[in-house]
Image (cartoon, rainbow, N blue to C red):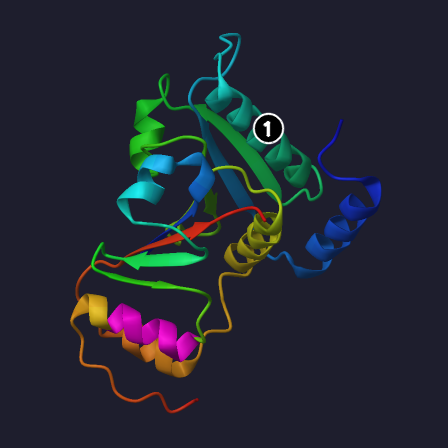
Amino acid sequence: MPFLQEQDAAFVRTRFAQELRGDVALEFFAPVTGGLALPGQDGEIAEYARQILAEVAALSPKIRLNVHSLMADPEAAKAFGITRTPATAVIGAQDYGVRFYGMPAGYEFATLLDLIIAVSQGSTAIAPHTRELLTRLSQDIHVQVFVTPT
Amino acid sequence: MRTDIVEAGEFPDLAERYNVYAVPKIVINDTVEFVGAQPEPHFMRYVAQAAGVQEAPPTDE
């Protein structure tokens, strides 16, 4: 059974058509991929997350889903700074450093859509003051946002 | 700047390490933390605090 009902898929498809500019790559990392079935909850959650991303990617020719295995493809994981799964790097014309850990369901599905559109447009509506402060930062900033689907 | 959005329920070890009891919980550089969505100028004050940057009062509040 698909994650998105046809009505919701149509809504997202229209929004993507109107708002996407550049191409977006969803770099998804599961514990393992392919014929090797991973028992237990982690494997099921990763598979469900992959299905959500596949349905989203199917709604615009500008979105591509690349599925990686953390175990089989450690080089890609290193390139995107991924150490846990399931993880998704949302990449536009450049890598803006945003990673999504876990299933992008519930309220976080809206977050995923906003994120895809933001990296596709390559710009956000942040205030001039925010922009100015960011240019003055000399050290790396690591923001972790803990969320739940409900 | 890098940002991780973490489903707390799926990564209980991280949720425990950062004492996540309510969401959204935001942790910056492991040193500054707060709970709840904040207006952008407030959010940036936390970022500045974590970075040790002198923060001028926001002009756009």
Identify the image quadrant of residue B25: bottom left
Question: Which of the pair A32/A72 is nearer the observer?
Answer: A32
The stretch drawn in magenta includes residue B47:
yes
Question: Which of the pair A40/B21 is nearer the observer?
Answer: B21
Q: What subunit carries mark 1? A: A
Identify the image quadrant of residue A135: bottom left
**In screen coordinates, is B30 left or right of A110?**
left
Question: Which of the pair B27/A26 is nearer the observer?
Answer: B27
Q: Is residue A21 visible?
A: yes
**In screen coordinates, is B9 left or right of B12?**
right
Magenta segment: B40-48
The stretch drawn in magenta includes residue A126:
no
**In screen coordinates, is A91 left or right of B1?**
right
Residue B4: x %, y % from top left: 38, 49
The amino acid type, in three-letter code, at marker 1 is Tyr
Residue at horizontal 48%, vertical 37%?
A: A102
Identify the image quadrant of residue A63: top right
What main secondary structure does the magenta stretch of the protein show? Answer: helix
Question: Which of the pair A66/B19 is nearer the observer?
Answer: B19
